[in-house]
Image (tube, helix red, strand yellow):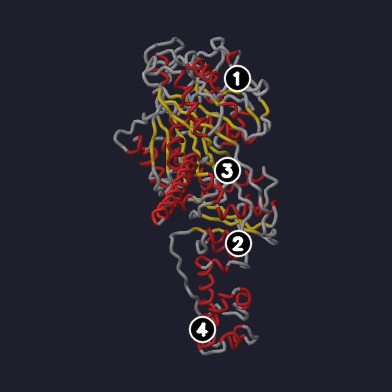
Amino acid sequence: MANDDKLRDYLKRATAELQQTRRRLHEIEEDAREPIAIIAMSCRFPGGVSTPEELWELVAEGRDGITEFPVNRGWPTDLYDPEPATPGKSYSREGGFLHDAGDFDADFFKISPREAADTDPQQRLLLETSWEAFERAGIDPLSLRGGRVGVFTGVVYHDYGVGGSTGGLASVVSGRVAYSLGLEGAAVTVDTACSSSLVALHFAMQSLRTGECTLALAGGVTVMSTPASFIGFSQQRGLAPDGRCKAYADAANGTGWGEGVGLLLLERLSDARRNGHEVLAVVRGSAINQDGASNGLTAPNGPSQQRVIEAALASGGLTAAEVDAVEGHGTGTTLGDPIEAQALLATYGQGRPADRPLWLGSIKSNIGHAQAAAGVSGIIKMVQAIRHGVLPPSLHIDAPSSVVDWNAGNLRLLTESVPWPDNGHPRRAAVSSFGLSGTNAHVILEQAPAVEETPSKVADQAGPLPVAVSARTAAALTAQLGRWHAHLAGLPEVSVLDVAYSSFATRAALAHRTVVLASSREELLAGLAADEQPITGTVISGSVAFLFTGQGSQRLGMGRDLYKRFPVFAEAFDAAAAATGLPVSDVAWGDDGDLLGQTVNTQAVVFAFEVALFRLLESWGVRPDYLAGHSIGEIAAAHAAGVLSLADAGRLVGARGRLMQALPTGG
């Protein structure tokens, strides 16, 4: 009997441990598949694109961003020769260029002019777009110093020609961002040729899911400092003579080179919800693989492309029919496009309802093949498409490629804009990138889960609110004010409360500051446009000194209103007055100016007043519980002078306004 009891107890313990192990295994599996939230995006692309919104306008309007060779890089003026394979020449003279790639505000990142000149423009662009990505997410970039924030960047070109300088090293492309912002997560530079940015995204997701990082930047950058790629591909006759990618078209006649930079700020979905970050879309699944020993080192491999698609679907727990559209690799080559189209037909094109074809397009038809930034350009495009409910057209398609058997599956090319209706499930799109190296990447995006907005418990505050704008230099501050004015003038639906909250809660407090006080949008716009701002200041250092005034500053009633309004002032005033042994309040708040003017009384009153004022200012920066009820002007002035921290000043606008993700960035 005793043995039976022991056996029964053992079996109970073993069963409980087994159940616990199964639960833990399930949790690990769920963690490994948790969607990754995209909480911000930033970019520069051809066609004058400097924001994700401008990229969307470009593709939604069907615009072409291809231009002639840049004239500010010292490229040979006789580079073009229409005859293919002429040594040292390019038979194409157009592409997708960042004509202002050399522009850089070195002072903003505290980089000397000499070091900036030695630094590859690719690194400079990543610095700018990294800062913007954090600000667009409502995160002060300076608040991340020492945090487990990762940087995963794709880069292919190392042709800036700076010798052994760190300005040209591949490792420093990601490392400089981490160094400049003090980020202590993983910093990884990826080069898998055309698939680099999506491979970087895949690695960033893994780092987030394992807890190695809490936030991660992922993307890629391409700037062609020399025309070597044009010359090399002209020798191989792989370029489109007009520089345009005619993706999946019968007229396809080669690729068109492009440039760009794109970054995504990523966070685990559960963390993004807990931290109150807006989710633009989620990455549901991703996969990478290699062509292996295929029919050529640089030739695409259809079966490998099918396998990477199937792996990405499996990682997201999806079927092919649950994906609505694919942003294809689509470089416009007569070899690669048909192979890719057949792989898509064999996977996504099968088992679909007749009225729900897979829609296929490529942003390369708008901006060229941005190489290390190609995949991330497709991500930004499709995130915007998901949010707008529209699939934009691809350009330069005279007719679907006659080499492809389009009847082998339910797939259609996006030759015109197509509405993206609600099909009873979240909108989903996949993005492909296939590297010249044979490394393939496939990512599946999904519409962000709906979140019920809770109404603010804070009523609109009467009276003026402060909107804080800051920059590294006085000139940059003036320029920033102009950008804010132009931006907000086009957003009539945005309230002063929203702008005020976002300006304090989501922006770095840089040295040159101004605060515009406004009770209405009209007052705000007028203040931003004014030549002289009402409250300005420059923070010289991180230290604040207080100088007590001497005799002569006294006046009847001094400190009376502050005493009534702020408990911290009253407490300090009473303590200081008691220490003097004189009837300080009676003298200061009486009606006898002669009595106040007597030296013994004057110095006691001024001393008590200055001590109390110091404690009040100290409480604004150190003890935020006393912020309620402060004068708007006093708070604004204290922030502009560097006395009041940005975080504490943000409380001024009443707990939370509505966060504006897209205030002008930088400064």
Q: Looking at numbered disc 2 in the image, what kind of residue is underneath it?
A: Leu
Q: Can I make out residue 128 in this image?
A: no
Which tag, 2 or 3, sits closer to the chain's start? Answer: 3
- Report the residue marked by disc 2: 652
Quadrant holding the N terminus: bottom left
Residue type at mark 1 is Leu
Give me the C-alpha separation between circle 2 and circle 3. Answer: 26 Å
Q: Is residue 266 above or below residue 158?
A: below
User: Is 69 rendered above or below residue 56?
Assistant: above
Q: Who comes first in sequence, dot 4 or dot 3?
A: 3
Element marked by disc 3: loop
Q: CA distance from mark 1 to mark 2?
A: 55 Å
Front residue of this view, candidates 602 and 143: 143
Which of disc 4 and disc 2 is earlier in sequence? 4
Q: Are marks 1 and 2 in contact (CB under 8 Å)?
A: no
Report the Cα–Cα distance between label 1 and label 4.
87 Å
Pinpoint residue 93: horizontal percent, then vertical percent: 48, 18
> Which amino acid type is shown beneath numbered disc 4?
Gln
> Relative to the observer, which residue lies in front, 348 or 226?
348
- Say which label, 1 or 3, has the lower sequence index: 3
Q: Residue at x 60, y 79 (%)?
A: 555
- The residue most toward the left is 164
Labels 1 and 2: the sequence-earlier one: 1
Image disc number at residue 411: 1
Which of discs 1 and 4 lies nearer the camera? The answer is 1
What is the spatial separation of the Cα atoms under label 1 and label 3, in whole angstroms? 29 Å
Mark closest to the chain's N terminus, 1 or 4: 1
Residue on which the image places disc 4: 603
Residue at mark 4 to residue at mark 3: CA–CA distance: 58 Å
Callout 2 touching callout 3 (CB < 8 Å): no
